[in-house]
Image (spheres, rainbow, N blue to C red):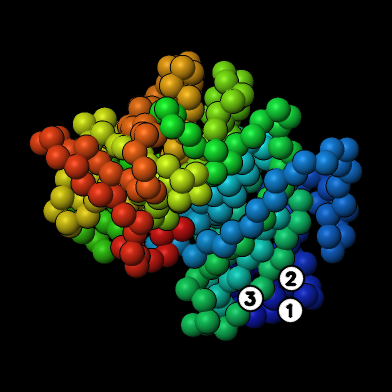
Amino acid sequence: MNDTITLSHGSGGVQTNRLINEVFFKYFNNDILNQMNDSAQVDIDFKKLAFTTDSFVVNPIFFNGGNIGKLAVCGTVNDIAVSGAKPLYLTSAFIIEEGFSISKLEEIVKSMADEANKAGVKIIAGDTKVVEKGSVDGIFINTSGIGRIYENVNINCANAAVGDVVIVNGTLGDHGMTIMCARNKLGLEGNLMSDCACLNSLVDTMIEAYAGIHVIRDATRGGVAAVLNEISEFSNVTIALEENNLPIKEEVKGATEMLGLDPLYIANEGKLCVFVPEAYAQRVLNVMRNHPLGSDAAIIGQVTRELGQKVYLNTVVGGKRLVDMPSGIQLPRIC
């Protein structure tokens, strides 16, 4: 097979079958996918399910810490996990530009398989379309996922309550600044690396420690600021953050300061915000810090008794700064 995608690879004929067998089946092989049905047939003996779908158009396709394929798997797994569910199955659809390198495609697909295996999920169905050169910027990926919601767990964006503590599992803005510096060739990369990771094992340990967690959300586009404003609105609460407690890498801090950006608004792909009653916060924080994906976990704020729906920051100089919902977009095609 030549190392170039042609329109014939999307025709449904011989080249399509070769592409599926020699690239996708090579890495996604499992008993359900091998049934070769138009839809995956899965026996499910439970009722409460979490189902999600997302599309990924990140630019550049390859970046320090991952690529569009790894990002697609992690993003979908995380959307299920933060709902208080165990991710089980994914589907994946590819829109590929004519002329795209098959070796690069294979690298992307392999990274998806590797990440799915780490997360304990199976990619059980998919689709491939090839479009004329110039119609797509290399490759776009859509993924959908389904998971089983744990019993006796009620994690919801509307559940934040006065007295809750806000915890993040690590440093903020890593993914967004990595993408921005790579895309614009700013020469600021240093040790910048995307935090792209599947967080379901971390969520599992948190729920095992305390099943009464009120809210878990992954802070992707719009960063922590967007997520907290959504929670503030849906829960009708005020959230007070402490600037001194925000975990931010020096590389990210330096890059954002130079570019006039705020790390609270920068995208993450391996960070989540947790709302837990204060009495159980230290227990949850401890298990997070003992997990590889939560070693830099920190308490960054709390839900206060003030009236109104807002998020604000207690600054290092003793003032208060309103943290609004992001307006517009700082960096398109971040995921």
Please name whichever residue, 25 or 261, is drawn nearer the observer in this view of the structure: 261
Say whether marks 2 and 1 touch (CB < 8 Å).
yes
In the drawing, does residue 211 fall left or right of residue 181? right
Say whether marks 1 and 3 touch (CB < 8 Å).
yes
Residue positioned 37% across, 47% down in the render: 308
Label 1, label 3: how far apart the Cα atoms are: 8 Å
Horizontal and vertical percent for residue 80? Answer: 63, 44
Res 16 label: 2
Q: Is residue 204 above or below residue 77?
A: above
Label 2, label 1: how far apart the Cα atoms are: 6 Å
- According to the picture, the residue beneath numbered tag 3 turns out to be 130
Mark 3 closeness class: few <14, some 14–19, many ≥20 residues within 10 Å: many
Horizontal and vertical percent for residue 214? Answer: 54, 33
Placement of the N terminus among the 4 image quadrants: bottom right
Mark 2 closeness class: few <14, some 14–19, many ≥20 residues within 10 Å: some
Q: Amino acid at mark 2?
A: Thr
In the drawing, does residue 292 fall left or right of residue 3? left
Horizontal and vertical percent for residue 3? Answer: 57, 67
Label 2, label 3: how far apart the Cα atoms are: 10 Å
Res 167 label: none
- Nearest-to-viewer mark from 2 and 3: 3
Kindly tell me whether residue 224 is visible in this rendering. Answer: no
Which element type, helix, strand or loop, lies under badge 2?
A: helix
Which element type, helix, strand or loop, lies under badge 3?
A: strand
Q: Amino acid at mark 1?
A: Ser
Please name whichever residue, 72 or 276, is drawn nearer the observer in this view of the structure: 276
- According to the picture, the residue beneath numbered tag 1 turns out to be 11
Furthest residue toward front: 307
Which element type, helix, strand or loop, lies under badge 1?
A: loop
